[in-house]
């Protein structure tokens, strides 16, 4: 949804996904709509793959000015329950992924004289949640990473911000809610003052704002989009 929204705004888009076929399908959808898009297969936890994919994107489109780190996974369990492998995989995707995205994209942003970097954190990045130790730890760390990027590169014209959604109707949410250790969807919906999950397009609109000239003085912010869940 973020890629589609950016393409509609006129951006030339490069989509990175571990599943290259799915990335290509999204790129084809943008192209059919008259936009410009390419796709590349890359695991966000693999530095060499990310560098190659990001360099490919910059070469294809003549540089980069907007970067969105949106890949993520959610694995459940307390520190006593979850396997160490699940902990390491969660950190690799949810934290090392945004780090590697920034590491290999920021040089291209600097070549353009600045730009915008947005990482997807979570409402679990600003509060705890029982049974989500690794997920909360990784998403809290994303907020810290973005704040440091804002301080380190703001003077170079790069604005860095985080989006913190609560549950969004996505395949990842469906997979998580199928876990026997996780309550049903209705349980979480009742905790949202607006009474529903977010739609991916609603999150995409926040990304559009943060990467636009409308947010030209917004740097180091975490934007919570949660229907009021964390209000009290």
Image (tube, rainbow, N blue to C red):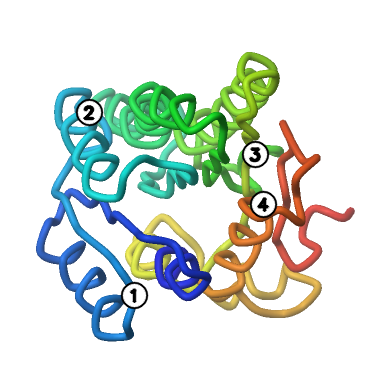
Q: Which of the labelled discs sits on residue 161, or is there none?
A: 3
Nearest the eye: 202 or 52: 52
Q: Which residue is mark 1?
A: 35
Q: Percent x, y for residue 96? A: 37, 25
Q: Quadrant of residue 118?
A: top right
Q: Which sits earlier in the primary sequence, circle 4 or circle 3?
A: 3
Q: Percent x, y for residue 169? A: 48, 73
Q: Work out whether 186 lies above or below 57.
A: below
Is 134 on the left or on the right of 163, as rendered? left
Residue at screen point 25% across, 30% down: 45
Q: Quadrant of the N terminus?
A: bottom left
Q: Which sits earlier in the primary sequence, circle 2 or circle 4?
A: 2
**Secondary element at image label 4:** helix
Residue at screen point 40% across, 41% down: 64
Q: Which residue is mark 4?
A: 210
Q: Which residue is mark 2?
A: 51
**Secondary element at image label 2:** helix
Q: Residue furthest top?
A: 152
Asked whether residue 81 is in view, the answer is no
Q: Work out whether 43 lies above or below 179.
A: above
Nearest the eye: 123 or 156: 156
Q: Which sits earlier in the primary sequence, circle 3 or circle 2?
A: 2
Q: Do the numbered discs 3 and 2 sit on residues whose CB atoms are within 8 Å?
A: no
Q: Do the numbered discs 4 and 3 sit on residues whose CB atoms are within 8 Å?
A: yes
Q: Work out whether 75 lies above or below 230.
A: above
Is 89 on the left or on the right of 215, as rendered? left
Distance of label 2 from label 4 (alpha carbons): 24 Å
């Amino acid at each position: 949804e973020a890629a589609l929204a950016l393409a509609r705004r006129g951006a030339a888009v490069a989509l990175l996904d571990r599943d290259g076929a799915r990335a290509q399908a999204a790129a084809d959808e943008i192209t059919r709509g008259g936009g410009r898009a390419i796709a590349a297969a890359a695991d966000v936890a693999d530095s060499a793959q990310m560098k190659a994919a990001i360099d490919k994107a910059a070469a294809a489109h003549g540089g980069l000015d907007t970067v969105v780190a949106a890949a993520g996974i959610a694995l459940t369990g307390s520190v006593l329950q979850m396997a160490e492998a699940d902990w390491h995989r969660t950190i690799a995707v949810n934290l090392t992924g945004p780090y590697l995205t920034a590491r290999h994209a920021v040089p291209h942003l600097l070549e353009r004289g600045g730009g915008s970097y947005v990482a997807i954190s979570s409402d679990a990045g600003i509060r705890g949640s029982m049974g989500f130790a690794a997920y909360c730890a990784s998403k809290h760390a994303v907020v810290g990473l973005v704040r440091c990027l804002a301080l380190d590169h703001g003077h170079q014209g790069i604005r860095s911000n985080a989006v913190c959604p609560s549950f969004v109707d996505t395949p990842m949410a469906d997979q998580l809610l199928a876990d026997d250790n996780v309550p049903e969807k209705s349980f979480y919906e009742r905790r949202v003052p607006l009474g529903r999950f977010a739609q991916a397009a609603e999150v995409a609109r926040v990304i559009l704002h943060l990467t636009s000239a409308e947010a030209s003085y917004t740097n180091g912010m975490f934007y919570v989009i949660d229907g009021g869940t964390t209000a009290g």
